Amino acid sequence: MKPTVIVGVEGTSSSHDALLWAADAAHRRGLDLVIVTATGFPTIALDVLYDDGVQSGARSLLEAEAERARAATPGIEPLIEVDRRTPALALVERSWTSTLLVVGSHRLTALERVFSGSLGYQVAAAAHCPVVIVPHLAPDDARGVVVGADGSADSLEAIALAAAEADSTHQELHVVHAWQEPAMYVSGDYFSPGFTAELREAEGVILGESVAGLAEQYPDLVVRTHLTQEQPATALLDAAAHARLVVVGSRGRHGVARALLGSVSHTVVLHAQCPVMVARIRAHIQPEHL
């Protein structure tokens, strides 16, 4: 089976933007684009004629979105699929065999933020491949791909994805490492006068190691590193204020924990104003026996 880029659509403005982002991504990668819409589980007493109407409407939506993709990205020929399951289930199931999932996301209400009600959040938290959440397309003057670094395997995966994306779109890569001094419950005299400088130097080493090898792998890629003493999510959102894309890592988890992202990824996904790519390390994730 040829690798694919999957995009979920539902006829909203954000899913229109997600479609355009996905079409461009599939074209750049030389992959098939599959456009999916989900109608939800049919009720037991569902009238056959009503069900036919729902399926016909879904098919019409997909055909219109396929034409939109062709117009925006000449040369691409999308595949279309109607799924009777809920949108989250339909997309997460396809993530086992896809290269990338793309989904739109509307601006969340305060209540939705509390309960993680966004479809994009649900898919990003449970998917088995990288997910791009598109609240809207970045403006024409947006520049750069931003990614967070903390030295973990997850952030290294995020940096690898961000570097590939920045190189293929001819954008600069901005790697942000935010650090904070540990909470201190003892007298400040306990620490050496140069403690903060030593800590900053150590954090700088982590940042340097995180980008090691990128110059050799992508000779034409401009990589800019940013070491800042700040809360990580705040630092990423500030750096991504005028970016084309921000990339975050997310540990592959099992069971109930897979329904949640880490705190930094959670905050960035819910508040970023540009598309957000959530990395996934497939080696962390094994099929679950239900």
Image: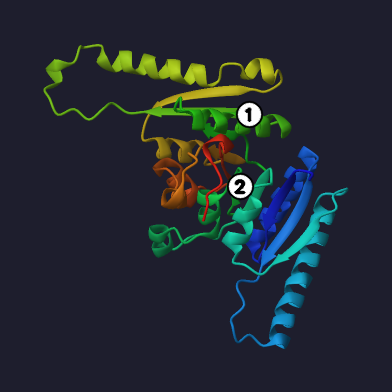
Residue 176 makes an appearance in the image:
yes
Residue sitting nearer the eye, 240 or 278: 278
> What count of labels does the image hold?
2
Locate residue 186, reporting x and y percent: 12, 25
Mark 1: amino acid: Ala
Mark 2: amino acid: Val
Locate residue 32, reporting x and y percent: 79, 47
SS for dot 1: helix
Please tell me which of labels 1 and 2 falls first in the chain: 2
Horizontally, residue 66 falls left or right of residue 247, namely right
- Disc number for residue 132: 2
* Image quarter of the N terminus: top right
User: In the figure, 213 relative to 229: above or below?
Assistant: above
Q: Quadrant of residue 111?
A: bottom left
What residue did someone put label 1 on?
Answer: 163
Write the residue at 73% across / 32% down.
168
Write the residue at 60% across / 54% down.
92
SS for dot 2: strand
